[in-house]
Image: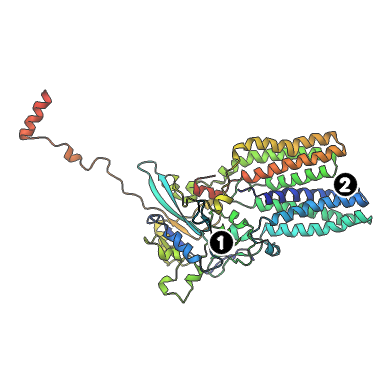
Amino acid sequence: MHPAPSVIIFSVLSGLGFGFMAYLALGFLPLVGTWAFIAWAIGYALAVGGLVASTAHLGNPQRALKAFTQWRSSWLSREGWAAVLALFALAPVALGDWMGFGIPFVWRGLAAAMALVTVVCTAMIYTQIKAVPRWHHWLTPVMFMAFSVAGGALLAMQATLAFVLLLALAVVMMALFFIGDREFARAGASMETATGLGRIGEVAVFEQPHTGDNYLLREMIFVVGRKHAQKLRVIAVLFAAVLPALMAAVGGVALMLAAVLVHLTGAFVARWLFFAQAEHVVGLYYGKR
Amino acid sequence: MTCLPGHTEKKLGLAIDLDTCVGCHACVTACKGWNDQGYGVPLSDQDPYGADPSGTFLNRVHSYQVQPPEGTAQVINFPRSCLHCEDAPCVTVCPTGASYKRVEDGIVLVNESDCIGCGLCAWACPYGAREMDADAGVMKKCTLCVDRIYNENLPEEDREPACVRTCPTGARHFGDFNDPDSKVSQLTAARGGFDLMPEMGTKPTNKYLPPRPKDKRHEASLLAPLLDIQATGFAGWLDRVLGKI
């Protein structure tokens, strides 16, 4: 799949922002006044910035509001609703922290839950796609959630929690790399089933349907950069999880903030790989993966 | 609403005969020609006469070489377009309701004025049936020529999809799969029409008719009886003499 920058930026930043704000809502980082304002502003900037970036992916962003209509069937629509509800639910909590008035813990808990539901909905947009077997696995939402809560814990200065969650993230990332590599074969699609010609024999491309490229080749049959995939996987796990975990183990505000940047670098590499390595079954018609 | 209708009155679709398709791409151009001026925005091209041409098409013809366990390989031409699936994953993922499956005839359509161009439906389709138009930023797909098949301004013989109407070998058949007496149902039953990628669980409406089995070539040469000629007379005497030298 084509790793569009807008979608990578959206899923990484929004995931981190909603994870961070869940910790803020639950009172993990007891800040007041200006510091509370700054922390919440960072959370909102990450979440909203990511959502705005995602509209750059649209062919007709001026109609984006229509995407709220199909929540009954579409995960993308549910994601939109969850994000808006979470942002509204978190707003009084943020104001309360800043202005210094109390918000009932039930409300805080609901707002935090809504933030994490948004992350699950984002993950489900990809997980639901059966035609991309690497994504169509229950570990995909687990991975998105692990990124969100581990990155959020780092930003919320929860050194011990961040250490544990980042190590868990490393495990989830490696498991998904390992399992994901087998999913295409497990889905059972091949050139023989795609064409139905397996009943005659082994199928190979004789001639492509077009000599130029097209939307399908650009969007779904992205093969650039797979050459370095193994090295990038190591870089992703090291930067997103292992190094920040070690930095969190040492602790200290400055080191934790630096760890957030290291984690973000790794998260961008990991999310790029998430798209670049995902193979769509339509590639079979072109004899490509 | 992008929930799928549980049942459609008709199941309009195509039966595509892989035995008779000669790979001429006439259906590709007829489709592009008709859909460039009918339903929705035109199918745009980018850099059409330049070094790197690209464009939106709703129908593509692949050519495959299939190697049976024994004998020589076969070339099979393979038109690929929307299969108007019963369980269409492209419809349910749509966040705006632009993608829908019609209750009356099962045709999967895009309401372009509602399409935000997110591309998720194209990701959800295993068959590459949907292409985003690079100019208009909306998703394009086969409409089964919905603006031809019910069009009373057209002569009756033209009220079928452009690809079917144009096919010079009659490899594409249009009809109602819900009607067991329709041409497409009969053909599918008689020829063992099959689904593409059934493991994706999409329940395609369109069926593909497999190539008929090829005649077996005789292993021995047709000239074999002639090759065993015994020379007689003068030629026979020459044959014997030359054989002894």
Total number of numbered discs in the rendering: 2
Q: Which of A184 and B54 is in front in this view?
A: B54
Amino acid carrying mark 1 in the image: Lys
Amino acid carrying mark 2 in the image: Phe
| Chain letter of disc 1 in the image | B
Q: Indicate the position of residue A148 as horizontal and vertical percent values.
A: 76, 46
Residue B11, compared with residue B218, is above or below; it is: below
**Quadrant of res A184:** top right
Disc 2 designates what residue? A28
Q: How far apart are marks 1 and 2 (CA)?
A: 49 Å
| Chain letter of disc 2 in the image | A
The answer to whether marks 1 and 2 sit on the same chain is no
**Quadrant of res A173:** top right
Residue B100, compared with residue A180, is above or below; it is: below
Compared across the picture, whether A265 is left or right of B170 comes to right
Residue A21 visible, this angle: no
Please tell me which residue is depicted at 5% across the width and 33% down the height of the picture.
B234
Residue B140, compared with residue A201, is above or below; it is: below
Mark 2 residue element? loop
Q: Quadrant of the C terminus of chain B?
A: top left
Q: Indicate the position of residue A212 as horizontal and vertical percent values.
A: 50, 51
Please tell me which residue is depicted at 75% across the width and 35% down the height of the picture.
A242
Q: Indicate the position of residue A57 as horizontal and vertical percent values.
A: 66, 55
Residue at the extreme bottom:
B153
Mark 1 residue element? strand
Disc 1 designates what residue? B140
Compared across the picture, whether B222 is left or right of B142 comes to left
